[in-house]
Image (tube, rainbow, N blue to C red):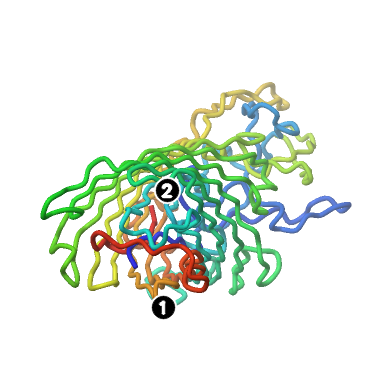
Amino acid sequence: MTFRSLLVAAGVLGSISVASAQTPPEPPKAPPAEQAPPAEQAPPAEQALPASAESPAAAPAAAVPGAAAAPGAAGPAAAPAADGPHPSAEPVPPAEPPSDVAPPEPNARSVTPPAVRWNQATAADTLLEEDEETTLRWRATTFTWNQSGSTTLAGVGGEYIPAMQVYGWDFTFRPNFYVLDRPRDKLAVSAEIGWVTELTNSDTTATYREPQFKDIALNARYSRELWESGGAQRGEYKTDAAMRLRVVLPTSPTSWNSGRYFTLGIGPQITQKIKLLGSKADGLNNVTATLGVTYAHLFAESYTPVNGDIRRVRQTPSGEVAVDDQLSGWSRAMDRLTTSLQVDVPLYKELGLAASFGLLSDFKHEFEGGCVDVSTGCAEIDGSEGTTYLPQTAFDISLNHPVFDVVDLTLGYNNTNLQLGPNGRRRNFFYSPEAQFYLDITANLDVIYSKVTGRGEKVEKKAASAPGRQKL
């Protein structure tokens, strides 16, 4: 089986999308007595992959006076607490989760807590014609069981952060259907539905080993074969192009309790296959490179995370008490631009290697300046001092091997983290406290169905193609 099986994501990062691998901040501990939602339903402002990979929890910041909220924002914006620093003076906030980025094809998954890695469900899907197993319209339908844990939990790495000692399971069902299924043109629609369970106790959920739904993603992808070599080199060189559309719905506790509506992502990609030893060799047949760019935008109730069920009592600089529904004073990453490159190589027969690299550029809202009333008059606040651009880097490498074509095993390593660490220094591209190992066990449901029922004619492969796990 080829690298289509490697496109499976494990949980997390996240993905992307972009809009986005750190542990979310601790939710408020004292909600109203009449209805105190569970911790997972009172999420922090942001969580960073994510795919599923978050940074250490931090106490929510006070609201920014004079901050402009998106249309329809619920509740007034509260003034900052008297003893709290202005958000613009605080360290770099945690990044957004990558659940809003464009999807991979055909075996992608978005990672949410407790996974530490960002499953770059963003830019590339390298499914070529020769990777198709059957003629079923719903081929590439999969169910994935992911096991992932932080590298420091396994004793690898120099930095030990208790909040990052996470091991969890991620389950994802990904139905896929080809609306248009022609030799050179294809249009596929898919969904990603799943849940996660943390098996350690790192405070990512309110209850020990509590299952949580992930955000549901709806994907559409149109692909076209642009060129293929002929003659004696037939199928050894090939160029494909695709355009992807992704909608992420806020079905996870973190999303539906922070005022998210949905995330819309769109982006092109191009895939090039190049001959190495050729399709008749036992290994190193060819190399497949996929370059993708994705833009995603978050539609939400406000630029900052809000929860109408949690009305916090805050003290303004003038000493007055105000009730507020904001979970943080930081702006969300409203826009995300993801650039990714994935390289797939068949090592020996069906054993494949996949490596992916990504840059996630998060753009936050820039609040306008304003003032708050104090005993001496109006205290000016300059809203332009906050950080509005946060880059993240992602690196993933994995080995994949199919078992009788019905199950794919993927063993990999992923590092997704903010480019700048809490100390203001640039982090290593290949390692950080958020790095993790993972194991994916993916059931190819269409292949199992074909073997059991005899339906769905198997497609003869034109050329050996690299098994690849879709990460970016």
Structural distance between the alpha carbons of marks 1 and 2: 30 Å
| Total numbered labels placed on residues in the image | 2
Circle 1: residue type: Gly
Residue 66 vertical position relative to residue 326 in the rendered view, above or below = above
Camera sees residue 91: no
Badge 2: residue crowd in 10 Å (few <14, some 14–19, many ≥20): many
The front one of 65 and 265 is 265
Where, by quadrant of the figure, is residue 127 drawn? bottom left
Q: Residue at x 60, y 64 (%)?
A: 196
Q: Quadrant of the N terminus?
A: bottom left
What residue does disc 1 label? Answer: 155
Residue 221 vertical position relative to residue 64 in the rendered view, above or below = below
Q: Nearer the viewer, mark 1 or mark 2?
A: 2
Where, by quadrant of the figure, is residue 155 drawn? bottom left
Where, by quadrant of the figure, is residue 353 drawn? bottom left
The front one of 178 and 399 is 178
Give percent across and percent down for residue 382.
Answer: 54, 26
What residue does disc 2 label? Answer: 122
Q: Earlier in the sequence, mark 1 or mark 2?
A: 2
Q: Residue at x 28, y 47 (%)?
A: 271
Give percent across and percent down for residue 346.
Answer: 25, 66
SS of the residue under disc 2: loop
Give percent across and percent down for residue 296.
Answer: 48, 38
